[in-house]
């Protein structure tokens, strides 16, 4: 989470908006990921990237039409999200749980 957004994501307004959006998605389709439709939603994603300039604008930050309930896999594919931040991960795990250096694959 970016430093400028910490206060917003901890706010009552965001927590209420997030809970209402998830409840809405649960009523619509049981809470499936709005991207892949294969997994359960995990995180409410802002479709408009939040910036220091728009973080105080509820028409952007609290607008249900600008949100998506997505699974972790789909969320991490958005630019600037996920551990790799758009770059392939250098490490993965094999079927037995052992780390594999992906740079050598």
Image: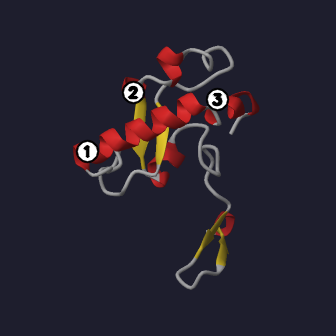
Q: x, y percentage for residue 56?
A: 62, 16
Classify the position of the N terminus by image quarter.
Answer: top right
Measured as percent of width and height from the top left, residue 5 is found at 68, 30
Please say if 11 is above or below 31: above
Which is in the foreground here, disc 1 or disc 2? 1
Relative placement, left or right, of 75 versus 26 is: right
Q: In the rendered view, would you say 77 is above or below 8?
A: below
Residue at numbered disc 1: 27
Looking at the picture, tell me which residue is in the foreground, 92 or 2. Answer: 2
Q: Earlier in the sequence, mark 1 or mark 2?
A: 1
Chosen colour scheme: secondary structure
As drawn, the residue found furthest toward the left would be 28
Which mark is on residue 8?
Answer: 3
Q: Quadrant of residue 93?
A: bottom right
Q: Residues within 10 Å of mark 3 (few under 14, many from 20)?
A: some
Of mark 3 and mark 2, the one earlier in the sequence is 3
Counting the numbered discs, the total is 3
Determine which residue is flagged by label 2.
64
Q: CA distance from mark 3 to mark 2?
A: 16 Å
Which residue is farthest bottom?
A: 96
Residue 15, by quadrant, is top right
Is mark 3 in CB contact (under 8 Å) with mark 2?
A: no
Residue 49 is situated, as x and y percent measured from the top left of the image, at: 55, 26
Residue ID at (48%, 24%): 62
- For marks 1 and 2, give the CA distance: 15 Å
Query: CB atoms at circles 1 and 2 under 8 Å apart?
Result: no
Name the residue located 35 percent from the left edge and 48 percent from the top edge: 33
């Amino acid at each position: 989470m970016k430093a400028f957004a910490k206060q917003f994501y901890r706010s009552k307004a965001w927590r209420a908006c997030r809970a209402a959006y998830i409840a809405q998605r649960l009523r619509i389709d049981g809470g499936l990921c709005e991207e892949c439709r294969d997994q359960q939603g995990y995180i409410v994603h802002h479709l408009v990237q939040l910036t220091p300039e728009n973080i105080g604008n509820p028409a952007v930050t609290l607008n249900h039409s600008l949100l998506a309930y997505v699974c972790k896999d789909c969320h991490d594919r958005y630019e600037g999200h996920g551990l790799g931040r758009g770059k392939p991960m250098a490490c993965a795990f094999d079927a037995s749980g052992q780390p594999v250096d992906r740079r050598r694959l």
